[in-house]
Amino acid sequence: MTFKYWRSTLAAAMLAATASTADAASLSETMKPTWDALSNNGEGYDLSDSILGPDSPYDFGGWLAVGYSSQRTGAFNTYKGFAPTQGWLYAAKTLDASEGFDWGFRVDVMAGADGPDTQAFGGDFGDWDFDNSTQWDDGKYGLAAPQLYVELGYKNFKIKGGKFYTPVGYEVVTAPDNFFFSHAFTMYYAEPFTHTGALASYTPIEGLEIFGGWTAGWDTGFSRFMNGNNFLGGIAVQPVDWAKLTYTATGGDLGWIGEGYSHSLVADVTVTDNLKYVFQTDYVDADQSGGAEYEAVGVNQYLIYTVTDRVGVGGRGEWFRANSTDYYELTFGVNIALLPNLKLRPEFRYQFSEDVEDGQPNTIGVPVDQAAVAFDAIFTF
């Protein structure tokens, strides 16, 4: 091969690359009107803003989430295969007490494969939405009404009463607010999802919030199952812009899980503009009816990197112990915003327990020593 040959080959490659770049740019310009139409010029569509206007204190909307998992994880993903996981609607009035007295409210209803786990299963059977008859729950899919509360506020003090999501932990029930499609064992087996009661919060200075109140146990409707009667409260401290530490505890008669105490400690750290690290540890110790005891502790770590405005990658590592049996899970996932209102969350998850393989009881009954490929799509409106 001569130098002349290589030079001519390189020139041809550069010409092809230039042509390809020009073609790509031309294609991009051709597709831009379609992208702008689908994405509302990159801003996304908001049904509430379109009808009520962006300055209205009232808000309504929701999302539709459909997912697939090659294996059940035992933590929300109860079935293999495709399933509509969350069809969600909400209505709310935003509370803004910065200038004085204000009020707000929120109500949520949902249906899907996550429905049975989102119901008030910690209350009396037949109370609120906890009823596995055909009107609420057919076994695989269910309806739920996880929130119904009113809120009052005056400057740096506010209080809400009714049924509301728990402030415990890092992961939440609502799909758009989590990085991963699947959930940690700690979230599912060591934390409540909702409470019914009253919760007040006070922000004496910027970067410090103190909150506390009373609830009727874990995951209740509007009844006090097993005389649920417990404290819920904690403190959130943000000494610098890039780090926040939140401690949340419940104590007393927790209802269905027993009488005892739990806490969750979450450190949320912005390492760089693109990289976030989260450390979480939970603990629960409850004496249950019949003399049984439930003791669990978990440590979760998350690392989430924002590649672009529309792509993020992340990992979660977890150790969870329930009644002296250890469980582990590793999850790697990607978030892809195809449109401002449409997100894909593919992931790979591996969970195992050496203790169960050695013959120790599987105290929470999850599948062990398995890998799962899963993804979901979330369309918000």
Image (cartoon, helix red, strand yellow):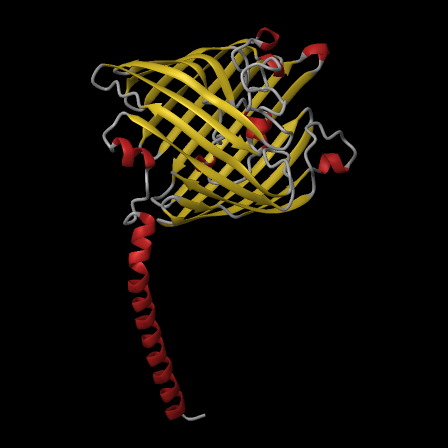
Viewer-proximal residue, 318 or 37? 37
Task: List the single residue furthest toward the right.
Answer: 359
Determine the image quadrant of residue 120. top right
- Image coordinates of residue 252 in percent, x first then y, are 55, 9
- Image coordinates of residue 336 in percent, x first then y, are 43, 49
Residue that appears at 30% across and 64% down: 30
- Image coordinates of residue 156 in percent, x first then y, are 28, 16
Q: Is residue 293 left or right of residue 231?
A: right
Instruction: Mark yes or no: residue 81 visible.
Output: yes
Vertical placement of residue 277 versus 128, above or below: below
Residue that appears at 62% across and 13% down: 258
Task: List the single residue furthest toward the front.
Answer: 135
Q: Is residue 100 left or right of residue 359?
A: left
Quarter the C terminus occupies: top left
Instruction: Mark yes or no: residue 165 visible.
Output: no
- Image coordinates of residue 317 in percent, x first then y, are 55, 40
Viewer-proximal residue, 271 or 105? 105
Quarter the N terminus occupies: bottom left
Residue that appears at 68% across and 34% down: 366
Determine the image quadrant of residue 16. bottom left
